[in-house]
Amino acid sequence: MDRCQRYRSDRCQRSDRYLIFFAIAPLLLQAQPRYEAPLGGVVFLQSAFYTGDTTDAVHLTNYPEPDLHIFLKKNMTHPGCDERPYTTVFEDGFDTSELDKTKWLDYYPYPHPFDTLHNPGSNSAYLAENVTVDDSILSLQTQRLDKPLRFRWQEIPGAPLYTKRIKWSSGVVHTNNRLPTSDNPSGCFRFGKFCASIRIPSTRKHWGAFWLYGWPGEIDIFEFCLPDCDELQSTLHQWNIPMPGWGPQGHPAYPQDHQFGDLSTDFHEYCLEWTPYKMEWSLDGKPFRTFYRYYRMDSNADSLVLVGLECPDIPIGDSVEVYEHIAWNKFDLFYLDLILNTTVSGNPRKLSDVMQVDWVKVQQRKAMQITGPTVLENFDSTYTFSWTGSDVPDQLDWELSEGIELAAVTDTSLALRPIPGFSGRVWIRAVVPNNESCYPLYLEKQLYLPR
């Protein structure tokens, strides 16, 4: 979803700078993208234009804007692949009678009128009345307004006054990054698995989207009806790269269209796995697109080849030579929010439609575990628990349920005593800061006191 026309127009200023020319034709393979060019058409260049540091680069110029395919030579330190298990850090099954406002906003957190209008190019206004929860299903409705709404704004004080008349309204939910635990105003999440079970709108020109956004990056897990309602489109956006004609905050975009037939008749599971090495999109557990970060450069008598690398393909050690796709430039520093929304494309014949969401889940790689007994049988005994994990700080504040009391605590262990006369389930829990999300993690263990 192109945010170029957001209320801050300086993001879209253009310039006439350009870098290099490279005659190359890509051959895209589904599992492992491969780019190949004849040796006579290969040009290597040293430039500080894109990263600020002098960098060897290879540029593919056969793509029209806004695509920008440049590979930057890097010597990286590779410690090895992250084998920690995934832990759920955010989820919502919509089991309450209304939207959980501690998890979600039902508007865009931008200055008015873009909290409602979203951007100057919007065809609909985002109204809270179009966001409902019923029978454990989130519904995001799009409907034609009985009376059009009018919006006015100025990009800067003293600038011309813009006016827009809106005939449609839609629904949006946006993860709430305004929590006390959040110190990343651009977004909530960095890396992880982002999944949702969704039934998309069934009517042509009623648009559904599931995406991540946090300036200056965006990942569209899916958009429908852009431009073809028979296709799912996945896209990676950047606003952090100098581009010819765009200035220091150019906007390369990397869309890909996919045909899966009619997905509006039932719920389907849409997922994105975002790691430091790749982005992988999947539908109902089956990957359908992979965008790699690092590539290996090979050559033979006739051509030069760039091959996408899975994490295990990269040797462990210092000064490992790789070529990084420029779409990933500083993308590992971005924190993104999770967004689901509907809107319209053009002027649909049907006056309303809805996108339904059964559940949403975000998982990240974490390694935390409490070890110790599960059943506390003797009321006159003390039970000791310890914990492990690279993500766990030295000092924790523990929370205990009724039925148990704290006997002692150190930096690596705690001792508990059952309270006489109590039986049933009990628990211990500590909040653990999460450096890759504005939602904290919980180190916890369920226990049981027999009668």
Image: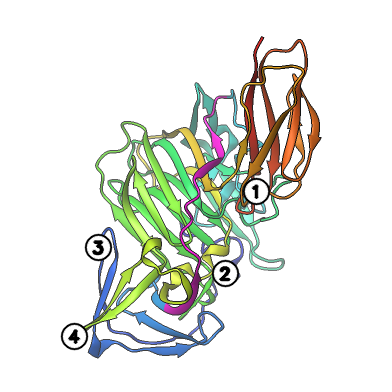
Amino acid type at image mark 1: Cys
| Mark 1 residue element | loop
Nearer-N-terminus badge (1/2): 2
Q: Which residues are magenta?
A: 72-95
What x and y, as percent, mark residue 137?
48, 27
Nearer-N-terminus badge (3/1): 3
| Mark 3 residue element | loop
User: How far apart are the two marked residues, 2 and 4, measured between alpha carbons?
Assistant: 42 Å
Residue 104, visible in the rendered structure: no
Say whether residue 302 is left or right of residue 90: left
Say whether residue 157 is left or right of residue 297: right
Q: Residues within 10 Å of mark 2 (few under 14, many from 20)?
A: many
Amino acid type at image mark 3: Leu
What residue would you read off at disc 4?
A: 302
Tell whether label 4 touches label 3 (CB within 8 Å).
no
* Residue 11's disc number: 2
Q: Residues within 10 Å of mark 3 (few under 14, many from 20)?
A: few
What x and y, as percent, mark residue 432?
68, 44
What residue would you read off at disc 1?
A: 438
Nearer-N-terminus badge (3/4): 3
* Residue 292's disc number: none
Q: Which residue is depicted at the point 64% across and 38% down?
A: 443
User: How far apart are the two marked residues, 3 and 4, measured between alpha carbons?
Assistant: 20 Å
Q: Quadrant of residue 261?
A: top left
Tell whether label 2 touches label 1 (CB within 8 Å).
no
Which callout, 2 or 4, points to the residue nearer the camera?
A: 4
